[in-house]
Image (tube, helix red, strand yellow):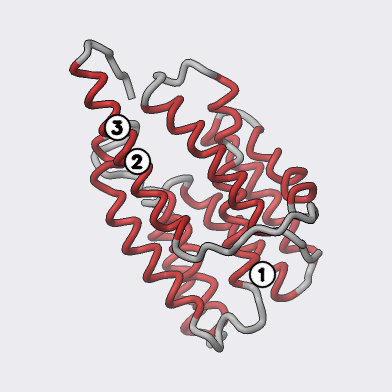
Amino acid sequence: MPFKNVELIKWVALILMIGDHINKYLLNDTIPILYNAGRVVMPLFCFVLAYNLARPDSYTYRVYSKVCQRLMIFGLLATPAYIMLGGVIDGWWPLNILFTLQAVTIICYLIELGERRHLLFALLVFAGYGAIVEFWWPAVAMGVCIWLYYKKGRGVFILLAFVSCVLLTVINHNFYALLAIPLISIIGNIRFNLPRLKWFFYVFYPTHLYLILALQLYLTTKGYLFFT
């Protein structure tokens, strides 16, 4: 099913992400509605990435390698703030969501190449990289299955994407990630022209984390306590 407004899905995901991170890093997760809404963010970003990568000219115009490089650069730039803000399980682990999206991109590229050895590499990336990125294997599997659905047009892949989204309940401890499905269907079909800002979303991710970190450090000097 083609969508008229994938760009709007990204903007909705970004707004929900801001609310989720403010709640997590500045409000000690005290506003449940922001946390629950935040569970939708990763599926939305994952869908947009997979949908765009599945376009017919992605391989020809080296979209995979370009996206992969950008995700690596801005994922690394975001890492110090991501770690300093707290909320990670152990030290640097898991890596932030940009690396999750990079894992999806790498696997889709390897599957696109199509040879048996590339498929083996894709499986190894899924097993290894999926173990160290945010939302782990369910997120990576969901992105790859969405991509496969739009590349191959087979319903089994969208079913597997749905199953992967359901498995996020183990991580999130709720089913709110599934709200991404009706959101994509509704928002993706709204006729509302938005400019395509190629670099904005990459730059925004580390920038907003550093701004939240600066505010968190300032509030700490004023006596506020943070428990992430």
Q: Give the crowd class for mark 1: few <14, some 14-19, many >=20 residues within 10 Å.
A: many
Task: Relative to 213, say whether 187 is above or below.
Answer: below
Across and down, in percent, residue 171 comes to 52, 36
**Residue bearing mark 2:** 209
Task: Relative to 209, say whether 108 is above or below.
Answer: below
The kind of residue tagged 3 is Gly
Q: Is mark 3 on a helix, strand or loop?
A: loop
State the separation of the CA atoms marked 2 and 1. Answer: 32 Å
**Residue bearing mark 1:** 148
Of circles 2 and 1, the one toward us is 2
Decide which of 24, 146 is in the foreground and name it.
24
Decide which of 73, 5 is in the foreground and name it.
5
Who's the residue at 27% across and 14% down the image?
225
Q: Residue 220 occupies which quadrant of the picture?
A: top left
State the separation of the CA atoms marked 3 and 2. Answer: 11 Å
Across and down, in percent, residue 153 comes to 78, 72
Which numbered disc flags the more N-terminal residue, 3 or 1?
3
Q: Is residue 125 left or right of residue 60?
A: left
Disc number at residue 86? 3
The extreme top residue here reads: 223
Across and down, in percent, residue 189 comes to 80, 55
Who's the residue at 68% across and 49% down the image?
163
Across and down, in percent, residue 29 comes to 45, 21
Q: Is mark 2 on a helix, strand or loop?
A: helix
